[in-house]
Image (cartoon, rainbow, N blue to C red):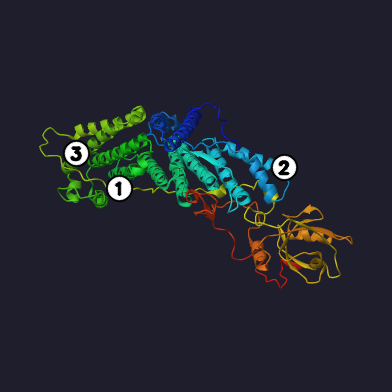
Amino acid sequence: SQQGCDPFAQTQRSKLQHRRARINQQINKEMRMRAGAENLFRATSNHKVKETVALELSYVNSNLQLLKEELEELNSSVDVYQNDSESISVPMIPLGLKETKELDLLVPLKDFISEHYGEESVQFEKEIKEFMELRQAMRTPSRNEAGLELLMEYYNQLYFLDSRFFPPTKTLGVFFHWYDSLTGVPSHQRALAFEKGSVLFNLGALHTQIGARQDRASLPGLNQAIDAFQKAAGAFNYLKENFSNAPSLDMSAASLTMLVRLMVAQVQECVFEKMTLLRAQNDFLSRLQLAQEAARVEDVYSLVHQTMSQPHVKDYVPFSWTTMVHVKSEHFKALSHYFAAIALCDCPAPSEAELLEQEKAFLQFHVTMPEGPSLRVLLQDPEERRKLGKAHLKKAIMKHEEAMRIHGLCKILRKMDILQEVLSFAHKRSLSKYSEIDHEEDFFETGEAPDIHPKTHQKPEIKSPNFAQVKVTDLFHRLGPLSVFSAKNKWYPARRVHLMRGENGFGFTLRGDSPVLIAGVIPGGCAAEAGLKEGDYIISVNGKDCKWSKHAEVVQLLKSTGKEGVDIGVITLQGSECPKAADRKAAVMSSGSAVLKGDKENSRKSLMNSKSASTLLVWSKRSKRSKKSTYGGVPFTTVGDNEAMY
């Protein structure tokens, strides 16, 4: 079975996860103390006690504040996740994984197996332990393809767990505990959706860590980073669209919107870097394109910054993230003006042949038209080009300085010399260009350069998780086909029927397989005498388990019986006594080891018997029943190809 990382392998990243786990435990303890103190404060009327408790509360609250700051600093340790390459790349923001508590499912699942399925639960201990081992492993996934597959495998396995053990009207009674990735605050719920949502969140977070560690100085590294951040955006977006009422802040709609936008911005930044790698040639049009790409990056980071600054988001997003995003939007705005200036000042005036193409590109380059002569004149006049170039550089330098100023306001970012280095390099480059084109005899007032129109050659995609890529087999396959043996179906206790073969056979028609259905019983025949009913499922023949047996296998077993007759085990689904229902039930999913194909999960208010039903994270599945039943919609009266009389 799949393994998680060795949690004791002391890499930088696992040390971070350990510190995060420790802080989470302390936050948990402080929150319990706070809850106790608040209850006492409300319950007591004694003034002295109230004062003592109020003091205690303020102490606990300041402790919590410190712990949250420590956690924020951890969330800001972006450099630990970056690659070790020598070349300078601007750091990206990765997310820490959500922590979860251990979960013991042995007793609850065994109880359910014996009560609901009527099976010897001891015989399923191996499967339950295997499931728990898989859960344990997915708590520490490795930062690569294998780690992603491990999370996917567990997520897909939850689909089967849900179908087998979570009836729509009742919970298993176990709580799923997860810590908020951003605040460290613990939450717990009985709804399996909370477990699924948290695993999905970690899938997104793991993609961000993989994206952040790529060496973006090379094309393959850049493409892998783009892929990882697009998949991270896809996971957070899927979570936002398919789960609601999450109990923790990191999974709220506002938070997920922010994360999707952050990932899209990081993709856009990688696309800019890719352009700078690919466009080594320094012609006029290439530089205009670079300026527009940079303006596009500035655009998306501005949007992320706005999203992070919203009242209900800014309190729990690490300050260093908000600052870094702000710094990047200013930095890329500076770059867009720098490349505009370079295009104007370092490229020769166009020949007649090039003029039309350059004029066309320049027409759509600025947000508003630059003041002065017409574009055609401007492009052909080196002095006019220098003037506009100088205006762009002036704006670039202002923006570089603004980026450095904001960077300096954040204690955590100040420690990040990589970012500092990138900002100051870009600033110096613009300054030296400015002094190179600045003439002492310039008496004109440098004008205000218009902003550059954002445009990209590669729009970021939001790539939804492809759950079908990791095939899983239902661990609880032995309970029987899911079409019948699921948590939502109820059936009467199994009956054993002894059947003798009459002159006209057994006197029933059979249909379908896994399990085979008794589709019709001939009045007065042997089957009717023995008490078999239309809609019964055959689960054993002469003691041999037939839940998964094909039609032909069951027929073969029946035909091979002699004069002594045959013992048949059957069950009847509750509520399926009318043929129509039996008909429908037989048509549903035939294979229990079917793989989950990105089941659309829609939130709906739950029927769970809980006081806070509205806060539960619940979903309904669109059932994958085909319109056409598996046996071609044969009415009961006719004997179709898949239905034969015995």
Q: Which residue is drawn at 55% across and 30% down?
A: 7
Q: How far apart are marks 2 and 1 (CA)?
A: 64 Å
Rendered image quadrant of residue 567: bottom right
Tell me the SS state at disc 3. helix
Which residue is identified by label 1?
Answer: 454
The image shows residue 77, relative to residue 465, as above or below, that is: above
Q: What residue type is labelled 2?
A: Val
Q: Which residue does the image show at 66% across and 66% down from the upper left?
A: 583
Whether residue 318 is situated above or below residue 488 in the rendered picture:
above
The reply to whether callout 3 and callout 2 are in contact (CB within 8 Å) is no
Q: Nearer the viewer, mark 1 or mark 3?
A: 1
For badge 1, the amino acid type reads: Pro
Q: Give the left or right position of residue 578, taking residue 399 as reference.
A: right
Q: Which of 558 and 91 is in front in this view?
A: 558
- Nearer to us: label 3 or label 2: 2
Q: What's the mark number on residue 122?
A: 2
Instruction: Give the residue at mark 3.
Output: 390
